Image (cartoon, rainbow, N blue to C red):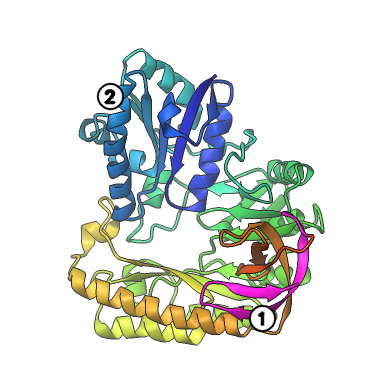
Amino acid sequence: MKKLYIETYGCQMNISDSEIVVSILVNQFTVTKNQTEADLILLNTCSVRDHAEQRVRKRLREFNALKKKKPTLIVGLLGCMAERLKEQLLYEEQILDFIAGPDAYRALPQLIEKAANGETGFNLLLSEKETYDDIDPIRYANNGVSAFVSIMRGCNNFCSYCVVPYTRGNERSRNPKTILEEVEKLIHQGYKEVTLLGQNVNSYHWQEGETTIDFADLIVQVALVSSDLRVRFATSHPKDISDKLIFNMASHQNICKYIHLPIQSGSDSILQRMNRVYTRAYYLERIATIKRILPDCAISTDIIAGFCGETEDDHADTLSIMNEVGYSSAFMFRYSVREGTKAAEKFDDDIPDDIKARRLEEIIALQQELSLLSNKQDIGKTVTVLVEGISKRSENRLFGKTDQNKACVFPRGNHKIGDYIKVRITGCTAHTLFAEL
């Protein structure tokens, strides 16, 4: 059988999509980790930031050498970058034999067949219905313990800086029956943890007859599949996170006490420009509610430095909300213009690169302090960790994550991957907890 080499860029949604792609091609290709033996190379791309696209273009240049040695090698590009740049990409990157958008993966066998016959192809149609809910993803590159389960696709929020609504289309929720069936299969395969995925999981909505299921209902149904299953989710939009969800998290021990709640900016004027449709005060009220109902819940976030028109006072507002919330971790980036977004059309990218870089450095430095403080507060506590693998630094140590999504390293003992074990936290860095059995 021919060999497929696949690289995935960007978010967890793309990892889940790559697993769907491998399942679609399973009768034609087996996955290889060695790009030199591949008959087909696929790059599943992200367009959220320019840096991600530049990494992909660099990899395509590197694959040129492989294609010269092996003229029959087929190279395809998938995902948001294909959807954003469309046919233009085929002219700019002539190594490509085809491109396919996020809703076109069922057409891959036909695109590959055309490429094998020397015909360049593309399929960039966005669907109002596609959820791939009848496809059983092949988890070709994970640890056999934790798995991603996509519950919806697309986004309706249209944040002014973001390309996702244009590259992934409108929101579509999966039938909950297919989600529960997928989770049950994972449990039978030995998985101990699932992460429910969506661009905004809190807007999940399914209606059948008189029955309506929202995300707060769905996560309980998933948690009830097995008490031995940990349940996580990503990502939440602050405007949609409900008291009902928070109370349901508190009521079920196996729903992890961790919420990723992107703030993006602490300034009301910047939030308005970003079209985030919430205020600083509203966001802090949601945080206060989470901490009241789930006092042990860890909260992480996304932050953009140097958005259009951001003043030093706006930047100071971001630093202050970071201190007020006390995030356990954060994804932090400098703003990059994305063509086709409202921000690119309406606002000037008027913050110089050196100021963006300095503000980002200050955000990162503060988050280092906050992450260290959050981890220090765990020292002395006894926590349950799901073992995910062997430590890279020592075969005598294991690593896993706590309920709060914190990485933890501890002695191996007689334990194995997939075990739940209790450990006592003895030390930490900003990124890792250290524990004893």
Query: Residue 417 lies in what quarter of the image?
Result: bottom right
Residue 281 is situated, as x and y percent measured from the top left of the image, at 47, 83
- 277 is higher (above) or lower (below) than 51: below
* Residue 403, image x, y percentages: 68, 68
Circle 2: is it few (<14), some (14-19), or many (20+) Cα within 10 Å? few
Q: Is residue 143 visible?
A: yes
**Quadrant position of residue 100:** top left
N-terminal of the two: label 2 or label 1?
A: 2
Image quadrant occupied by the N terminus: top right
Residue under circle 2? Answer: 68
- 387 versus 258 height, above or below: above
Mark 1, other Cα within 10 Å: few <14 / some 14–19 / many ≥20:
some
Q: Amino acid at mark 2?
A: Lys
Along the viewing direction, whichever of 419 and 163 lies nearer the viewer:
419
Q: Give the magenta-colored segment's residue range.
A: 415-437
The answer to which of 318 and 40 lies nearer the viewer is 40
* Residue closer to the observer: 157 or 259: 259
> Would residue 284 be found to the left or right of residue 272 on screen?
right
Asked if the residues shown at circle 2 and circle 1 are in contact, with their CB atoms under 8 angstroms apart, the answer is: no
Helix or strand or loop: what does disc 1 sit on? strand
Give how far apart the Cα atoms at labels 2 and 1 are.
54 Å
**Image x and y of residue 167, in percent:** 38, 45
Q: Circle 2 — which element?
A: helix
Q: Residue at x 53, y 77 (%)?
A: 429
Which residue position holds label 1?
A: 426
Which one is in front, 5 or 15?
5
